[in-house]
Image (cartoon, rainbow, N blue to C red):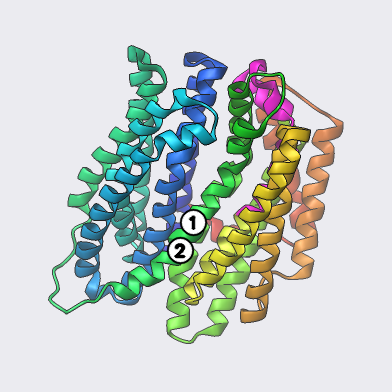
Amino acid sequence: MSSIERGTFLLFVSNIVFFACSFLLYLILGRFLLSPEQFGVFAVVISLVSIITTSMTVGIQQAVSKFIAANEEDAFLIRKKMLFFQFCLGIVLFAIYFTLADFMGFVLKDAGIVPFLRLSSLVLLFHPMLCVINGVFNGLKKFPRLAFFGIFYNAFKLAAMILLVLAGFAVAGAVLGFVLASLVTVLFGFFFSAVKKSKSGLDIRPLLFFALPLVSSAFLLNLFQSLGLFAVKALSVSSINVDVLAGNFSISVTVASVPAALLLSVSTVVLPLVAGALQKNDLKKTRVYIKESVRYSLLFLGFSTAILAASSKQLIELIFSEKYSFAAEPMVLLSLAFVFFALFQLLSAIIAAADRSRLPLLFIAISVALCWILNIFLVPLLSLQGAALSALFSMLVGFLLSAAFVAKKFGSLISIKAFFRIILASAIVFLVLFLFPVSGLILIPFYAGLLGLYAIILFISRELSQKDFAVFGNMVK
């Protein structure tokens, strides 16, 4: 198990770097370099194009990873054919997105955003190929290399975006930095993902058919994350500037989604493990993977959600200053919404590994449709809170559908005792922080103390054991 645990840890570190870079980017742009109005425009532009790029990252990477994990001797041909396919697809996506920029500006009621949308379309020429490279690393279980490229991409993106904004290009500079990061990382990764040649006649159509629902599901997942932002931009009737509201809501989503994004590493590792176990008809090992991945995810989500919900105002003001005070309003609801979102992502990876990749697509389609309907009614009435409430209710529905399927299919999810022990420990952390609020830099050591309290409660209740500490030891040594 040590290699699996270490792979999970390395990808977890990569995701920490990703969010460190994202936070630094939002902090520097939002607090120092862009006005709240400019930051709102930037957030909408990046969110729109990221729906497509992130969908590729999740869907194509998972598909390539699964097929290579099951057939490592075909890794060369899978890589070659998928890189060519993604290159062609990137050209098509670029043309469509560039052409639709005017329409998107019309829907968002902002013609001034169109040039930025067209500039951002350039990233679609390169990013699809990056997903294949990452999928090759993951399928071959080269987790250190996968983690390294994730760190390189995010660090380069941060530097490029900040430097171009400092050069005086404002929102356009930030968008162009995003484009350059994809280009440079693809060129760099192309040479480091080379694998041994093979001559078997490989048909990639099964991979594409498998990937299509995954990409569609990932597209809807990412649309779900940004749907509230688009609704605030297009549907708000507040007297406050719409771009200011959009910037505040984007900040809130960014902070609330940190735990979910950090746990993406668990989903990334679980998919090939479950796929491999099912390939060998090892149902016992499959159940262990499912139960432990859900349990460890809840352990992490319980603490992180408790502190986000209890100290949203203090945390937002510490990081982004009081000019983004509106961002604290929807944080409690959004932090809960992203608990269900994170668990849904994990369960979707498990379902996909069982060759039922169309089911997550159906579940998230239901959630997105419900979220949009709720936004139409709630955003004009409740503004940011309405968008957050829409996200919470709709993602809860998606999670319940996926959890019901996994529990029925595999007879495994999480023990009732473990669930309630984690909920109890999380509730105590929330109450302590809520009843004894602190602000400023003292929040950081206070969080550390609460983490110790959380671990003590779990240890006393026998939810944490020596086995868990051994697992953590294997991850970091």
From mark 1 to mark 2, how far is it between C-alphas?
6 Å
Q: Residue 214's spot in the image, x, y percent?
A: 45, 63
Image check: 240 left or right of 267?
right
The disc at residue 432 is none
Report the residue marked by disc 2: 214
Total marks placed = 2
97 in relation to 43, above or below: below
Of the pair 94 and 2, the residue shown nearer to us: 94
44 in relation to 186, above or below: above
Query: Range of the magenta residues?
Result: 313-341
Q: Residue 238's spot in the image, x, y percent?
A: 72, 24
Query: Farthest residue in the bottom direction?
Result: 281
Residue at left 47%, top 76%?
355
Residue at left 31%, top 35%?
179
Residue 306 sits inside the magenta stretch:
no
User: Can residue 236 be seen from the camera position used here?
Assistant: yes
Q: Are marks 1 and 2 in contact (CB under 8 Å)?
A: yes
Residue at left 73%, top 22%?
439
Quarter where residue 37 is shown:
top right
Amino acid at dot 1:
Ala
Q: Secondary structure at mark 1?
A: helix
Residue 337 sits inside the magenta stretch:
yes
For disc 1, the neighbor class at 10 Å (few under 14, some 14 to 19, many from 20) is many
Image check: 188 left or right of 104?
left
